[in-house]
Image: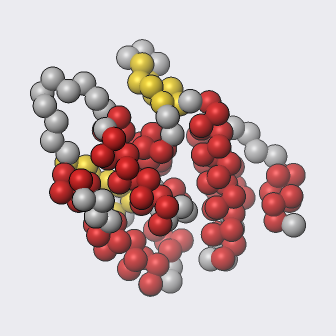
Amino acid sequence: MTIIISLNARTIDTLDLTPALSVIEPLLQEGAIALHEQQVQFQIDYPRKPDDPRELPEIPEIRLWFVRLDALYPWLPFLLDWKAGELTRYTAMLVPHQFHPKEGIQFNPEGLEIFVMHKIFVLTNWLKQHNIQGRSRLMAIAQMFGYELDDALFDLISA
């Protein structure tokens, strides 16, 4: 089941997290957050001039909204619909990058490494708090961005 968080210019420009809160908080309260893994998508309606070549993650107002959301729910990648590209788009909102016509999105390597490891640490703790087995899930997140994580890392951070 796909869960949509709809954003418009007003919510973005005022940093209003209500659209996300109204979707995510009930999922947390029902106590079965694991049932909603990889189901959340964002629908972003932000007007641009016809000659504006920027992608949504290149618009500072949108990026700032996502930075605020990530500060509140740093474990949100668990809920994002990876197959629909939501994890990559979410990452683009938070990590410096460039778009190349032939190669697609190119993340700043150091920024991406910091982002991935931060999410691994956050999600390791969050999954443990929710009694969700997560090692393979976390390895999959890292692999999506080209990183191979060793079991020893998880042993280290779980100790």
Q: Nearer the viewer, residue 68 or 134?
A: 68
Residue drawn at the location 86% of the way across and 59% of the way down: 155
Q: Nearer the viewer, residue 132 or 55?
A: 55
Colour scheme of the picture: secondary structure
72 relative to 113, above or below: below
Residue 38 position, x and y percent, is 47, 58
Residue 20 position, x and y percent, is 34, 66
Q: Nearer the viewer, residue 19 or 145?
A: 19
1 relative to 13, above or below: below
Q: Is residue 101 left or right of residue 113?
A: left
10 relative to 72, above or below: above
Residue drawn at the location 62% of the way across and 77% of the way down: 130
Q: Nearer the viewer, residue 44 or 38?
A: 44
Most extreme residue toward the top, as rendered? 102
Most extreme residue toward the bottom, as rendered? 30
Residue drawn at the location 28% of the way across and 64% of the way down: 16
> In the picture, which quadrant includes the N terminus?
bottom left
Most extreme residue toward the left, as rendered? 50
Number of residue marks = 0
> In the picture, which quadrant includes the C terminus?
bottom right
- Is residue 91 at all visible to an observer of this figure? yes
